[in-house]
Amino acid sequence: MQPKYKHKHWLKRQRTKNRRALYSFKTLILNTIELSNLIKMKPSLIDKTLTHLNYSAWAYNVLWVNVLWVKLLAFILILQFYAFGANAQETNIQETNIQESRAQEVSAQGNNAQDISAPPTDQGTPKRWFKVGGYVMLDYDQYGAFYNKDDSQSEDHLEIRRSKLGFKFTPAGPVSAELEFTYHNEYQQDEEYEVADAYINYKSSNDWNVRLGKMKEPFGLERQTGSTSITSIERSMVTTAFSPGRNLGAMLKLTQPHYSVAIGVFEEDEAQSPQAITSRMTYGFINPQQGHKHIGISLSFRDLKDQEFQIKERGESNSADNIIRSAKFDAQSQETIQLEAAWITRKIRLQSEFTLSSVKQTNDEEWLYSGFYIQGSYLVNKDDSIYRYKNSKIKPKIKKGTWELVARYSGLDLQDNDIGSEASIIMLGMHYYVNKQFKVMANILLPDISGNTVDDDQSGNGLSLRAQYVF
């Protein structure tokens, strides 16, 4: 006789878990904002002390950097506290579930079932139809003159790169929905709250999905990979230059284990609301022994409605200036094609994309831009930490204590008709997974640029650090 799962107890635990997640996110965001504001303000006590003692500017900078690193370390400790707390809560919930499930088995089987030491069964457990999740990313960037538009001095900045709170509704039936809110407090930008994903999805009996609302346009492998699953702090400059992000629209999508097809119509949230038709097709060669192979193609046609057009890039450092630029002109339309390929084993992840974009000026003159990247990563020391390939997506399955090495070479050509820049960047990275929720990342950037530049001094490299907490 199968045990009857008490649905009302499950709903009570689920509501408690959701309230804890919301409270943890709220508290973490408030602490993060307060710490970020403190970091942006130079301590007045240090200013008065240095003025009184007439120290040199060098001594001041050294002391200020030390203070900044102390605050960064304090924030990392805060994230670690939340990560361990979340682990403890999850362990307690799992233990409670096991005990209740065993007790229910005993009750269902009657007086003859006195031994409850056997592993519990999860049959009859209802599927979770409401989920709450999110993340917080704190970044520190340090870079030289290459990344500055008007200054030849090196700079360093600390910012809340991303934070997200998401709600996913998947009740029984063909209709589901997702709603995500994001918060940014980035250098040279105002604090910003916005809606990320907000859509309703209908899934037919033959696995076709119709999605309405605000969502990612179906374009590119790296763009479709979530921020917490990419193997670098920032996506390649090729992806950020050419791949569209989230926009309002309607999309038709089919996802199968071996292939996927998606096409949609979208409208950008800008002054004259440029419109687009975007599509993506992928195919996966599933082979666990020799590694999975993935190929895909994306196409996008955008009606720019004679608006001013220019591609600007920060060189894979979010707080830097837009130092890689194309020509500026009024444009009618843009057509972009992107090819993607990947090879995934349990420990190795290789992927590459090539993009070609043609932009038509209002006088019918054509401008051609292109870019590519090739990237590889390797999981070092944990046998049960692996890369997974499922439904045309690559996601890591990580155990605590795992190290990850990553390298990438990207090239971006925004020069045509002898106007614009051409740049390349070598990125080397090392990441450490403290546990499933908390990750620390470090990336070194080695840039090079030619053509039209915004600063004559092209010296200096870049360093990016990230503390990431996911719940």
Image (cartoon, rainbow, N blue to C red):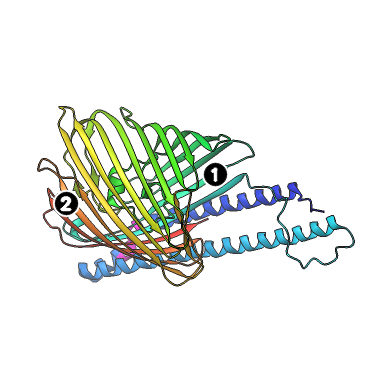
User: Which residue reaches farthest right?
Assistant: 111
* Residue at x 32% of width, y 58% of height: 375
- Tell me: 359 left or right of 84: left
Is there any visible trace of residue 195 in the rendered image? no
The location of residue 8, given as percent across then percent down, is: 74, 47
Residue with the mark numbered 2: 150
Q: Secondary structure at mark 2?
A: loop
* Residue at x 43% of width, y 47% of height: 183
Q: Secondary structure at mark 1?
A: strand
Q: Which mark is residue 167?
A: 1
The location of residue 96, given as percent across then percent down, is: 71, 60
Q: Earlier in the sequence, mark 1 or mark 2?
A: 2
* Residue at x 79% of width, y 53% of height: 2
Mark 2 burial class by Cα count in 10 Å: few <14, some 14-19, many 20+: few
Name which residue type carries label 2: Asp
The residues tagged by marks 1 and 2 sit, at their Cα atoms, a distance apart of 42 Å
Name which quarter of the figure residue 330 lies in.
Answer: top left
* Residue at x 88% of width, y 58% of height: 110
Nearer the camera: disc 1 or disc 2: 1
The location of residue 263, given as percent across then percent down, is: 41, 35
Magenta highlight range? 39-46
Name which residue type carries label 1: Phe
Mark 1 burial class by Cα count in 10 Å: few <14, some 14-19, many 20+: some
